[in-house]
Image (tube, grey):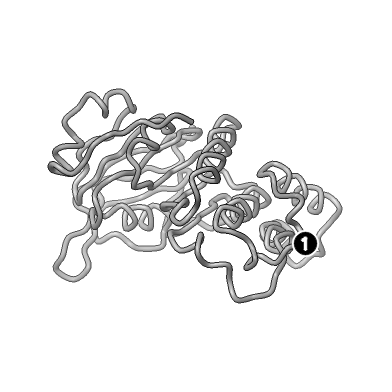
């Protein structure tokens, strides 16, 4: 089976400033990858490269076995950016309408079917927001909005969820509940790539860790990362792992 993401010798710079340098890593299908590094280390840039939102200066990237530059099955990717938690959107759409947008790629120019409606309702139920379906998206809390965005990805039948610090501004209880949801989705076979500033959360949840600070300092299972010197090398004296009770 081809990997979900295959990155080979990728570099990228903004002008003369290198942000990602000679990175090679593979994300297998069904994997939960934690992508960590200090502020300004290139995490978000690398994620954008993986998803085809940026074009590398050198190297190559494949998504599900296809060059990312020509990858057209966008419905297979669910992306939640850093800004999503605090941005409800200016359009007055309900949660259910937002989640239904995830079906448009499958319906094409045809009208949505009863099956599409069933899938939307199932997605709302999976993330636990059926009761919020008729609420306006911009009325929700940050944690509720995150669940709505995840539901839209599920409605589109996404195989990969890419999440860039998805719990910024979310209270602790909602954050714990959100990560339990991610665990459940990963158990169901969905590939997850997570950028999270809380290293303890990442090492508690992810099955593999990629630690970057322009260059890749570690890519492997979580246990080997914790036992390695990669954290100190990438973060200097500022990085430490604090485990949480969930």
Please provide percent x and percent y for residue 81. 46, 59
Helix, strand or loop for disc 1: loop
Residue 91, by quadrant, is bottom right
Residue 3, by quadrant, is top left
77 relative position to 242: left or right:
right
Mark 1 neighbour class, 10 Å CA radius: few under 14, some 14 to 19, many 20 or more = few
36 relative position to 163: left or right:
left
- Name which residue lies at 28% across and 34% down: 241
Q: Nearer the viewer, residue 132 or 206?
A: 132
- Name which residue lies at 41% across and 59% down: 52
Image height of 58 relative to 28, above or below: below
85 relative position to 15: left or right:
right
Please provide percent x and percent y for residue 64. 48, 44
Q: How many numbered badges does the structure rendering display?
A: 1
Please provide percent x and percent y for residue 36. 31, 44
Q: Nearer the viewer, residue 108 or 207?
A: 207
Residue 99, by quadrant, is bottom right
- Name which residue lies at 84% across and 56% down: 113
Q: Nearer the viewer, residue 178 or 159?
A: 178
Please provide percent x and percent y for residue 190. 55, 38
Residue denoted by label 1: 134
Instruction: Pick out the residue farthest to the right.
Output: 114
- Name which residue lies at 26% across and 41% down: 211
């Amino acid at each position: 089976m081809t990997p979900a993401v295959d990155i080979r010798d990728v570099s990228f710079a903004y002008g003369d400033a290198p942000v990602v340098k000679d990175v090679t890593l593979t994300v297998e299908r069904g994997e939960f990858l934690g992508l960590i590094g200090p502020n300004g280390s290139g995490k978000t840039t690398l994620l954008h490269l993986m998803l085809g939102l940026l074009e590398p200066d050198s190297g190559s990237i494949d998504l599900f076995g296809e060059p990312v530059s020509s990858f057209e099955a966008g419905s297979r990717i669910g992306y939640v950016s850093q800004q999503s938690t605090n941005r409800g959107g200016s359009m007055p759409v309900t949660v259910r309408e937002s989640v239904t947008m995830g079906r448009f790629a499958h319906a094409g120019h045809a009208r949505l079917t009863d099956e599409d409606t069933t899938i939307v309702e199932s997605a709302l139920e999976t993330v636990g927001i059926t009761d919020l379906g008729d609420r306006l998206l911009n009325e929700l809390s940050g944690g509720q909005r995150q669940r709505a965005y995840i539901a839209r990805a599920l409605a589109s039948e996404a195989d990969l969820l890419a999440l860039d610090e998805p719990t910024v501004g979310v209270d602790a209880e909602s954050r714990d509940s959100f990560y339990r949801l991610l665990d459940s989705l990963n158990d169901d076979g969905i590939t997850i790539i997570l950028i999270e500033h809380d290293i303890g959360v990442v090492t508690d949840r992810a099955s593999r860790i990629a630690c970057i600070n322009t260059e890749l300092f570690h890519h492997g299972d979580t246990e080997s990362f914790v036992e390695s010197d990669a954290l100190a090398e990438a973060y200097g004296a500022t990085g430490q792992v604090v485990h949480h009770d969930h």
